Image (tube, rainbow, N blue to C red):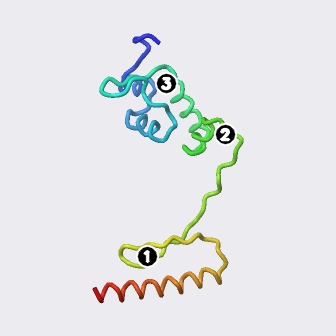
Amino acid sequence: MSRDARKSLAELAEESGVPARTIRYYIARGLLPGPLVAGRAASYGPEHLERLAQIRALQGEGLTLAEIAHRLAGRAGAELPAPTAWFSYPVAEDVIVMVKAGSAPWRLRRVQAALRSLAAALAQEGRSE
């Protein structure tokens, strides 16, 4: 690739219409490959411009960044895992326990009882120190 085909981050941002900060974010998320040359003189090629256009088109279809990453990685037919909800129980100032939502009610009651006992024991320890 000729040096003329390479672009700085500012040029890539201007030509693509995607802010430089967003381009850096896409690189960090793995949606966009890193620069051809790293460092202060970082440069980007036509493939970066093409990938940014793909990302924008897929966003226009309503896909999330996770779905876009999945599709760009060639796993378009594969299902994304379903989101999981979690309950957060602060047990002490420096302890939080996460419990997966959707457990049987009897099990959640037992977990809550155990967490109350743990919180009491931690509080007692803190007073005796």
Q: What residue type is labelled 1?
A: Pro
Q: Mark 3 points at which residue?
A: 49
Question: Where does the image place residue 34, in percent across and percent down from the top left?
Answer: 44, 31
Observer-nearest of 47 and 14: 47
| Residue under the image location 61 percent in, 41 percent down | 70
Question: Where does the image place residue 21, in percent across and percent down from the top left?
Answer: 38, 37
| Residue under the image location 54 percent in, 33 percent down | 56
Counting residues from the start of the chain, the first of labels 2 and 1 encountered is: 2
Please determine whether, in this image, residue 57 is positioned above or below residue 116: above
Q: Name the residue under label 1.
A: 90
Observer-nearest of 53 and 79: 79
Q: Which of marks 1 and 3 is in front?
A: 1
Is the residue marked by circle 2 packed among few (<14), some (14-19), or many (20+) residues within 10 Å?
A: few
Residue 100: quadrant of the picture: bottom right
- Judging from the image, what secondary structure is the residue with disc 1 in? strand
Identity of the residue furthest to the left in this view: 129
- Judging from the image, what secondary structure is the residue with disc 2 in? loop
Q: Are marks 1 and 3 in contact (CB under 8 Å)?
A: no
Is the residue marked by circle 3 packed among few (<14), some (14-19), or many (20+) residues within 10 Å?
A: some
Q: State the mark number for residue 75.
A: 2
